[in-house]
Image (cartoon, helix red, strand yellow):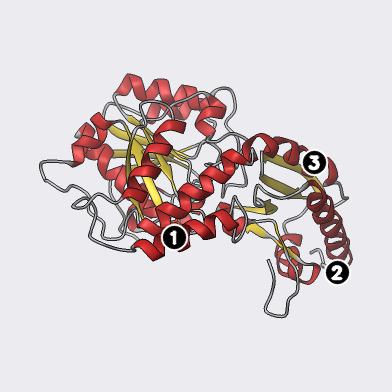
Amino acid sequence: MYGPDGKKYLDLISGVSVSNTGHNHPKVVEAIKAQVDSYTHLMVYGELILSPQIKYAQQLAEILPAQLNTCYFVNSGSEAVEGALKLAKRFTGKSRIISFRNSYHGSTLGALSIQGSELYRNAFRPLMPDTFQIDFNDEKSLDFIDSKTACVIVEPIQGEAGVISPQNNFLKKIRSRCNETGSLLIFDEIQTGFGRTGFMFATDRFGVVPDIILLAKALGGGMPLGAFISSNEIMSALVSNPPLGHITTFGGHPVSCAAGLASLNVIIEENLVESCNLKSSLFKEKLKHPLISGVRGEGLLLAIQLSDPVYVPYIVAKAHNYGLILDYFLFCNNALRIAPPLIIKEEEITLACQMLQMLLDDAAKNVMKK
Ligand SMILES: Cc1ncc(COP(=O)(O)O)c(C=O)c1O
């Protein structure tokens, strides 16, 4: 990235896991221009068949597990969450929704109601009723999933919690509990999708197939786009009684779909998923410093754990002076987020780690510890 003065920045955040193919990838820009030249918005969703939506939905169905073959495009991650919660309630005829502490699913009222942070939820009560949070990686808490539960929504790797991976087949255990209780399993892959964790989707990584998958962020190749995707049988619950059970004016905007499809093709053609794990190891190997107590995460979704949270705000703010774009996590105050575009080159990783080390030296010298 370049500032208005021409200063260069190494982007280690990707607009929070959006720009997986970098900024202004020529193939993505070309697809956007071609679509703008052809048409932009024509009609609200469904009355006219818009080929960019169809082509992209077909491509997604090809790379997702077989039963995730019916795609409803929306405008954002939060909207994908809203659509999925409605779909689960409608399909199961139940109302209870289970999510996880420290999860992040978006800022609309429904998404906020299931978010795993009391700090954020409390300020906006009353929220949606019949929502409950349980602990991630706590097998015992799965007993809360019962026959009244419409769905369980989970990030396969918790992002804002500071990149927390499931342990001891936790996702498999959620899947089997949902099967026992007749509840739908929703994977929020809004942050983990499109190669970010070293697999095209985290569902591939853990060998667990949800009933509904949520995509956004990198889905639009830098343009706004979200989707909830399920089997045709489940999605059909939105077709009748009432008809048009979910409506969106701009969802699946043709320009966003054209950009997203071009970006996905770049991920596939440039083998960005395959190279992600090597790049991940390089970061882990090079990120050594007295202030660093550990680096965790999968693929290029990493958290640098610092010895003290006091350093985090200073480092994130000062990063710009060192030509780095860095960020923190919403629910983990002692870690730095590393989620660069998947196109980052090995020499750029080396350079980024050198710059980070200088920045950490600066923090060690200048941040006053209480
Ligand atoms: C896991 C997850 N779900 C949902 C969302 C909400 O997406 P959006 O900001 O596009 O509404 C985010 C955004 O950060 C996210 O990380």
**Does dot 3 land on a helix, a strand or a loop?**
helix
Residue type at mark 1? Answer: Ala
- Assess disc 1: are there few (<14), some (14-19) or many (≥20) residues with their C-alpha within 10 Å of its C-alpha: some
Report the Cα–Cα distance between label 1 and label 2: 51 Å
**Does dot 2 land on a helix, a strand or a loop?**
helix
Instruction: Note whether residue 118 is visible.
Output: yes
Residue 167 spot, x, y in % from top left: 59, 27
What residue is disc 3 on?
282
| Disc assigned to residue 366 | 2
- Assess disc 3: are there few (<14), some (14-19) or many (≥20) residues with their C-alpha within 10 Å of its C-alpha: some
Q: In the drawing, does residue 340 fall left or right of residue 181?
A: right
Residue 267 spot, x, y in % from top left: 58, 43
Residue at 69% in and 51% down: 338
Residue type at mark 2? Answer: Asn
State the residue in front, 170 or 325. Answer: 325
Residue at 30% in and 47% down: 83
